[in-house]
Amino acid sequence: MAKDRTHNDDYAGPLRRLLIGVLVVCALGLFFLWRIDSPRVERFRAQVVDRVVPNFDWAMAPVTGTVNILRDFQSYQRIYQQNQELRRELQQMQAWKEAALQLEQENARLLDLNNVRLDPRLTFVTGVVSADSGSPFRQSLILNVGSRDGIMDGWATMDGLGLVGRISGVGNNTARVILLTDSSSRIPVTVQPSGQRALVVGDNSVAPIIDFLEDAGQVRPGDRVITSGDGGVFPAGLLAGQIAVDPGGRMRLRPAADYERLEFLRVLRNYQRDEIGTAGDLIAPDTIEVPIQAQTGGGDG
Amino acid sequence: MAERNNTRLWSMRGLFILLCMFVIFWRLLPLDLVPRNIAGPDLILALICTWVLRRPEYATPLMIAAIVLLTDLLFQRPPGLWTALVLLGSEALKSRSAGLRDMGFVPEWITVASVLVVITLANRLVLALLLVDQAPLGLTLVQMLMTILFYPFVIMFSAMVFGIRKIKPGDAESLGHRA
């Protein structure tokens, strides 16, 4: 028996090592392929997510719901405090409501005067958040809408109030949203009322950094930040949040979207944008093609 | 006898995959959409180390590669690199498992911790060499430390719930069907 086993080991050892070698080479090959031709592998990734995540869907919604109920249950302990807070906030809200009504009427009057038609193409698809990135290093989430619903890479997503992120990676039934807080997120914005242009740069913290401000002196905490539409990344004028200053003196964005409770997201349709299909080409002037055309022309003649 | 052993082997392999899928499922739940300053332990890695050191026939290289590659794809890591490193790490542990079997828990913990440190640093080094955007170093280190700290609990859990213990001379029989 013992002899038998050593024999087995002798036979299985090289085979095992070969298998492991093949696996490691395959994994590293995939990694280098990803480094060289990222879009294709990312599409593959989107497809894997599309296959796997909907299988979890039936369990995800109830489990998430239960955990959230348990969390809410803890807050019952300080229900009196919350009630007081809510009353105070309600009072403030009433003042705001009055102001909003007046502004709405004024806005309607002005629109009527200008005879403005809102862009009918700026419609939206609503999706439900079905999973998050699963890693503390990346800030993204997965929606249950995909290319089946006409979703395309690069579209903006918002919750009821403000910008949440952009679509990156679309499967048939799922789409990944890279949040503003992700360290790879860069969004061009305008700070109102001064009109300063800037970039919102995610850094894996709750409040992304406001970078590349022309004149920081003109910007104050509390100023509204909206998308500028520069570079055709997003439609202009979507509310992103407010300016805040951190203890170190850096300008940061306090997002208007409630990141604690993202359940339903709107994906804004936006057809006027460039698609990224390849890993990228050389940027060269068009004149290079001319000699080739001349040559073929000569051949024909 | 052989029949029963075979059923047990495959059911334990299934259990390992199921456990890993459960961890993946739990991490994908959209509970925390706000960035945090601390990172939880990488439980899948801890599970792999535990099972590879105790019952390598239940966690085969092919299964480990498939599971880690799936997490690479799902959790938005650069696909493949972490898979290769975890495979190499688990093989390194497996080759030392015979020596560690007779020793206590502390030498095993130190070995596992050193393997985790090496593969984490190797991962960062390769990513840095290839100029890939990386997560903050602090967060990576926190995750590594948490994995090391949680390792004993994963061992306890595996031993108490699923009976994954170190192989003793008495039950060498369970190895007989490895081929």
Image (cartoon, grey):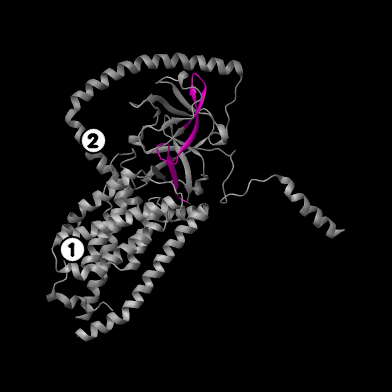
Please state the horizontal and vertical placement of residue A264, each as a whole percent of the image.
39, 38
Residue A175 magenta: yes
Please state the horizontal and vertical placement of residue B11, each as a whole percent of the image.
25, 69
The answer to whether marks 2 and 1 sit on the same chain is: no
Question: In the visual, does A300 lie left or right of A266?
Answer: right
- Residue of label 2: A72
Question: In the visual, does A68 lie left or right of B103?
Answer: right
Is residue B50 in view? yes
Q: Quadrant of residue B8?
A: bottom left
**Mark 1 element type:** helix
Magenta stretch in the rendered image: A172-199
- Report how many numbered discs are placed on residues in the image: 2
Disc 2 and disc 1 in contact, CB within 8 angstroms: no
Q: In front of the other: label 2 or label 1? A: 1
Please state the horizontal and vertical placement of residue A23, each as a whole percent of the image.
39, 67
A133 to A40, vertically: above or below: above
B15 to A82, vertically: above or below: below
Q: Residue at x 77, y 54 (%)?
A: A292
Q: Residue at x 19, y 61 (%)?
A: B108
> Which of the labelled discs sits on residue B162, or is there none?
1
Q: Nearer the viewer, residue A152 or B58?
A: B58
Q: Residue at x 55, y 31 (%)?
A: A229
Q: Quadrant of residue B160?
A: bottom left
* Crowding at mark 1 (Cα within 10 Å: few <14, some 14-19, many 20+): few
Q: Which residue in the rendered view is the most extreme toward the right? A: A301
Residue A193 magenta: yes
Tell which subunit mark 1 falls on.
Answer: B
* Crowding at mark 2 (Cα within 10 Å: few <14, some 14-19, many 20+): few
Q: Amino acid at mark 2?
A: Asp
Please state the horizontal and vertical placement of residue A223, each as a whole percent of the image.
43, 21
Is residue A255 in view? no
